[in-house]
Amino acid sequence: MNKPRFSFGDEVRVVRTVRNDGTYPGLQKGDQLVRRGSIGYVREWGLYLQEHVVYQVHFPAEGRVVGCRESELIAAEVFWDAGLFQYGDQVEVNATLTLKGQVVAAPGAVGKITATGQGLQGESFTVQFGDRFLQVPARLLRQVEAG
């Protein structure tokens, strides 16, 4: 049996977005429950399949209590650099994007982040605009609020 790394009341940070697997009431399967980087407090823990430690974590900013696997959590005081966007975020481009002289995304076009990266030009993202996937520098994007 695995021993838990965190105890009741420990402040933890979730390192990946937690989505509804269909067991969270009132939301659709796949809906975001907690964005990566969010801080929560351990309420209790248990075992899944008698070997995987799962924590019940209260995320006050989101007003949710969510089950998190141990691999999804770090101590809140550990250094964290989340970057600007994450997989699945909706973004809007603030410049014209061209490919071989053809406009493939006009200012205001909305896309979805499918990958993140760091290169010589700084933070960049793979963004899906329709059926195209484009590598876009962070400075050309802004987040579209969910709503």
Image (cartoon, rainbow, N blue to C red):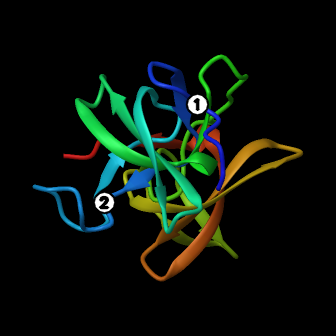
Considering the image in quadrants, where does the N terminus appear?
bottom right
Question: Where 28 sits versus 121, above or below?
Answer: below
Q: Nearer the viewer, mark 1 or mark 2?
A: 1
- Residue 53's label in the rendered image is none
Q: Earlier in the sequence, mark 1 or mark 2?
A: 1
- To which residue does mark 2 refer? 20
Q: Residues within 10 Å of mark 2 (few under 14, many from 20)?
A: some
- Residue 144, percent from left and from top: 34, 44
Query: With 119 as the anchor, is 102 left or right in this view?
Result: left
Task: Say left or right for 133 vs 91.
Answer: right
Q: Position of residue 32 (x, y in %)?
A: 33, 52
Residue 144 visible in image? no
Q: Quadrant of residue 132?
A: bottom right
Q: Secondary structure at mark 1?
A: loop
- Residue at 10%, 55% (x, y): give it: 26
In-image side of 135 versus 50 (left or right): right
Please identify the quarter of the rendering in which residue 65 is found: top left
Residue for badge 1: 6
At 28% from the left and 59% from the top, the residue drawn is 31
Count residues near mark 1 (Cα–Cα under 10 Å), then give few for <14, some for 14-19, many for 20+.
many
Residue at screen point 45% across, 62% down: 112
Where disc 2 sits, the SS reads: loop
| 122 or 115, nearer to the observer | 115
User: In percent of the image, x 33 and y 66: which residue is there?
Assistant: 21
Q: CA distance from mark 1 to mark 2?
A: 23 Å
The amino acid type found where label 1 is placed reads Phe
Look at the image and tell me whether residue 135 can be seen.
yes
Q: Where does the image place residue 133, in percent across and percent down from the top left?
A: 59, 73
